[in-house]
Image (cartoon, grey):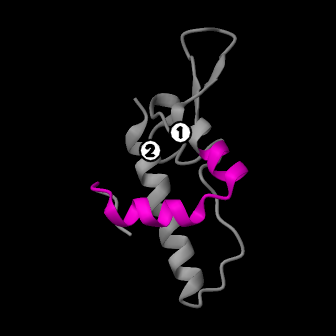
């Protein structure tokens, strides 16, 4: 599944919110870009991002991952406070 990516996003957003509250001048953030880490990891072999691409299909069909639905729900519901609470209690390799 995509649980690790969701856990990472929660912690990343919580850390960004904490930095803002601590006085950081944050103007925005980015989850991932279309070609994020492309050159570093050798082309399309690595699988990052919120959208899964089927490279076995010539049409390169896209399918939103579970994290895409989570992130969409987060944005629609302005769930920043909930993310901070969850990130504070979550156990993962990602650090705040």
Task: Tell me what residue is drawn at x 72 percent, y 49 percent.
Answer: 76
State whether residue 13 appears in this view.
no
Could you classify mark 1 by the number of other residues whose Cα lies within 10 Å: few (under 14), some (14-19), or many (20 or more)? many
Instruction: Say the numbered circle drawn on residue 5.
Output: 2
Q: Is residue 75 left or right of residue 95?
A: right
State whether residue 67 is above or below residue 87.
Answer: above
Instruction: Please provide percent x and percent y for residue 95.
Output: 34, 66
Gap between marks 1 and 2 measured at Cα: 6 Å
The quadrant holding residue 11 is bottom left
State whether residue 15 is above or below residue 79.
Answer: below
In the image, the segment drawn in magenta is 71-92
Q: Quadrant of the C terminus?
A: bottom left
State whether residue 18 is above or below residue 96.
Answer: below
Instruction: Please provide percent x and percent y for residue 55.
Output: 56, 17
Q: Taken as a whole, is the magenta stretch helix, strand or loop?
A: helix
Q: Earlier in the sequence, mark 1 or mark 2?
A: 2
Q: Quadrant of the N terminus?
A: top left
Instruction: Please provide percent x and percent y for residue 10.
Output: 48, 56
């Amino acid at each position: 599944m995509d649980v690790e990516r969701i856990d990472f996003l929660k912690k990343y957003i919580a850390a960004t919110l904490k930095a803002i509250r601590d006085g950081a001048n944050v103007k925005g953030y980015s989850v991932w870009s279309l070609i994020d880490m492309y050159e570093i990891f050798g082309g399309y072999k690595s699988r990052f991002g919120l959208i899964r691409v089927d490279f076995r299909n010539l049409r390169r069909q896209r399918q939103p991952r579970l994290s895409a639905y989570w992130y969409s729900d987060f944005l629609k519901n302005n769930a920043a406070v909930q993310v901070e609470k969850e990130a504070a209690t979550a156990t993962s390799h990602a650090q705040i």
